[in-house]
Image (spheres, rainbow, N blue to C red):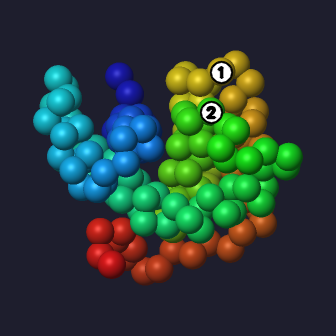
């Protein structure tokens, strides 16, 4: 049985993947995603997945700039869509969510990359997120809520 936040991160990955494949308002994708799920997810899982998806989309331009800065010789457009979206929401967690320890964020992202992407993705994701964690200053505003503009 997966831990709740692990489940939420898997949901966020699927939501962000859908958002990138079919750009439409993220709120619409979120609504459809939960309707299409066979599983009933606990409210705290839904809430954390929602927070990750909304925050990642809201700050995507800044997050992408930071990811490209640390992805030596890689453009985001050349990365696998799964790796790119895992790193996006993990960078969002690292930079904007004070309540999640960086070690947990990075470990979860690496595990997701190993599970859903290619063999070498775990190392790739780990390297970039580790650089961000050790170099960038967290931006987390107090009680950050991405749904509030």
Quadrant of the rendering where the C terminus is positioned? bottom left
Labels 2 & 1 near each other (Cβ < 8 A): yes
Give the spatial CA distance, label 2 vs label 1: 9 Å
Which callout, 2 or 1, points to the residue nearer the camera?
A: 2
First in residue order: circle 2 vs circle 1: 2
Determine whether 71 is above or below 110 in the image: below
Residue 109 appearing in the image: no
Return the x and y of residue 100 as percentages of the image width and height.
50, 57
Return the x and y of residue 107 as percentages of the image width and height.
61, 40
Disc 1 target residue: 118
Residue 113 appearing in the image: yes
Return the x and y of residue 62 as percentages of the image width and height.
59, 68
| Residue in front for this viewpoint, 46 or 99 | 46
Quadrant of the rendering where the N terminus is positioned? top left
Disc 2 target residue: 80
Which of the labelled discs sits on residue 95, or is there none?
Answer: none
Point 57% across, 75% down: residue: 139
| Residue in front for this viewpoint, 131 or 100 | 131
């Amino acid at each position: 049985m997966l831990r709740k936040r692990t489940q939420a991160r898997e949901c966020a990955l699927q939501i962000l993947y859908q958002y990138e494949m079919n750009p439409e308002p993220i709120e619409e994708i979120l609504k459809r995603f939960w309707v299409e799920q066979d599983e009933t997810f606990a409210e705290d899982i839904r809430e954390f997945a929602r927070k990750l998806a909304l925050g990642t989309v809201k700050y995507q331009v800044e997050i992408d700039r930071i990811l490209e800065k640390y992805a030596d010789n890689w453009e985001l457009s050349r990365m696998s869509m799964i790796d790119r979206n895992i790193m996006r929401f993990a960078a969002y967690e690292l930079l904007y969510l004070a309540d999640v320890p960086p070690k947990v964020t990075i470990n979860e992202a690496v595990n997701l990359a190993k599970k859903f992407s290619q063999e070498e993705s775990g190392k790739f994701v780990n390297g970039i997120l580790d650089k961000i964690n050790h170099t960038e200053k967290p931006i987390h505003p107090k009680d950050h809520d991405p749904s509030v503009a």
